[in-house]
């Protein structure tokens, strides 16, 4: 009689274990994100793989740009000139903080947001060096070196 009880106990244990594992499998199947049949037919876009040296160079360039902008903000002063409504920017003068000479001027269109052109000046002589004109979408239209 004891043998029969042990066998029944083992069978019940196996049955409960298999039932529990089956429920876990069903739960996992229901929790998976469902994909439409169309997503299987679409080609996977190939992303270009960059080498680590290219990524390092891009990171280095980004850091240099940030440093240059920080140095520029520390060594220059900005004068913002507004249109008669005192709200819309007409142009921004950027002056050297030591010499107080004009280094750069950014001129905006009537809306005060769209860049029209930027004129760069020699920090020693004050002469115009370069003027860059921009399209409505912000791309460079023309560069004139003086």
Image (spheres, grey):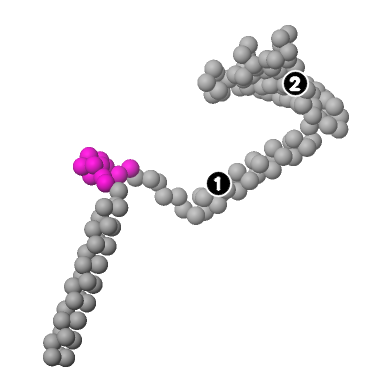
Query: Pointer 2 and pointer 1: residues touching (CB < 8 Å)?
Result: no
**Quadrant of the rendered structure where residue 64 is?**
top right
Q: Position of residue 73 (x, y in %)?
A: 75, 35
- Residue at 69 percent of width and 21 percent of height: 106
In the picture, measured across the screen, residue 34 lies left or right of residue 66, that is left
Q: Which is more toward the observer, 104 or 44? A: 44
Which quadrant would the C terminus be assigned to in this image? top right
Q: Position of residue 76 (x, y in %)?
A: 78, 32
Which quadrant would the N terminus be assigned to in this image? bottom left
In this figure, which residue is indicated by the disc labeled 2? 80
- Residue at 66 percent of width and 41 percent of height: 66
In this figure, which residue is indicated by the disc labeled 1? 58
Specify whether residue 68 is painted magenta. Answer: no
Of labels 2 and 1, the one closer to you = 2
- Label 1 sits on a secondary structure element that is helix
Q: Which residues are magenta?
A: 34-45
**Quadrant of the rendered structure where residue 62 is?**
top right
- Residue at 71 percent of width and 9 percent of height: 85
């Amino acid at each position: 009689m004891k043998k029969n009880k042990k066998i029944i106990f083992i069978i019940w244990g196996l049955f409960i274990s298999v039932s529990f594992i089956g429920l876990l499998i069903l739960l996992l199947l229901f929790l998976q994100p469902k994909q439409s049949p169309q997503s299987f037919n679409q080609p996977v876009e190939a992303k270009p793989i960059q080498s680590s040296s290219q990524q390092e160079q891009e990171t280095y360039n980004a850091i240099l740009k940030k440093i240059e902008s920080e140095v520029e903000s520390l060594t220059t002063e900005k004068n913002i000139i507004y249109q008669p409504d005192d709200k819309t920017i007409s142009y921004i003068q950027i002056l050297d903080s030591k010499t107080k000479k004009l280094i750069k001027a950014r001129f905006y269109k009537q809306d005060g947001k769209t860049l029209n052109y930027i004129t760069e000046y020699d920090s020693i002589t004050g002469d115009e060096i370069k003027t860059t004109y921009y399209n409505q979408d912000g791309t460079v239209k023309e560069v004139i070196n003086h």
